Amino acid sequence: MKYGIAIFPSKAVQDEANSYRKRYDPHYALIPPHITLKEAFEADLETVQEFITELKSIANQTDPFTINIQKVSTFAPVTNTIYLKVEPKQELIDLFEKINRGNFPGSQEYAFVPHITIAQKLSTEEYSDVFGSLKMKDFDLEDRIDRFQLLYQLDNGSWTVHDSFVFGKE
């Protein structure tokens, strides 16, 4: 089965992201807006149970922190993906590193760029139009992060929460 690890921001941040995603992101119906901490990986149930123990330990050692989003950015020219840029706070980077140096399978294909995707798989013309208008918009979103989620993929391609891990909770 396919698994991943992500942070789901507050409803206010998700609503802002979804105002763009419903039009520009073909994955809109498959997963809510999120910050990916661990790319999708394959694992069996026994292995996942071992991961859960490790993830609980990581969460217990992590204090809640705040993220800030003030602008959009893009992964162009690699892909025509547009995202809300999450300022790279040390607490978020540390959490990412703890999760990715654990015993989890799979490797990170790209460097960690904290973000929430709002548009992807756009044609070049549509990408230029959308990014051109969004890059002039100021965002002022702040969110308190106090947990992350282990997700699994259903047969229809959508993702659902397997477990949530609350920070600092013994």
Image (cartoon, helix red, strand yellow):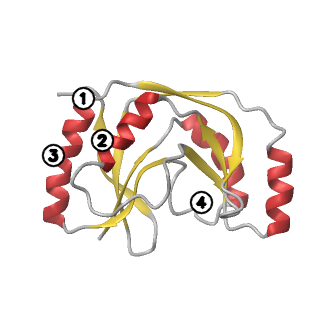
In primary-sequence order, the first of circles 2 and 4 is 4
- Residue 53 numbered mark, or none: 3
Q: Nearer the viewer, mark 2 or mark 4?
A: 2
Amino acid type, mark 4: Tyr
Q: CA distance from mark 2 to mark 1?
A: 10 Å
Residue 138 picture quarter: top right
Q: Real-space Cα distance between discs 1 and 4?
A: 32 Å
Describe the element under mark 2 as helix, strand or loop: helix
Q: Residue at x 52, y 52 (%)?
A: 32
Q: Residue 56 is drawn in which quadrant? A: top left
The mark closer to the camera, 4 or 3, is 3
The residue at the point 53 percent across, 43 percent down is 114
For disc 4, the marked residue is: 28
Q: Are marks 4 and 3 in contact (CB under 8 Å)?
A: no
Quadrant that contains the N terminus? bottom left
Which numbered disc flags the more N-terminal residue, 1 or 3? 3
Q: Tags 2 and 1 in contact by the CB under 8 Å rule?
A: yes
Mark with earlier residue (1, 4): 4
Residue for badge 2? 98
For badge 3, the amino acid type reads Thr
Three-letter residue code for mark 2: Lys
| Picture coordinates of residue 34, whole percent (x, y) | 50, 47
- Quadrant of the rendered structure where residue 27 is? bottom right
Spot occupied by residue 35 in the image (x, y as percentages of width and height)? 49, 46
Task: Work out whether mark 4 precedes mark 3 in sequence or the reverse, and give the earlier one.
Answer: 4
10 Å crowding of disc 3: few (<14), some (14-19), many (20+): few
x and y, in percent, of residue 52 in the image: 20, 49
In which quadrant is the C terminus drawn?
top left
Furthest residue toward bottom: 155
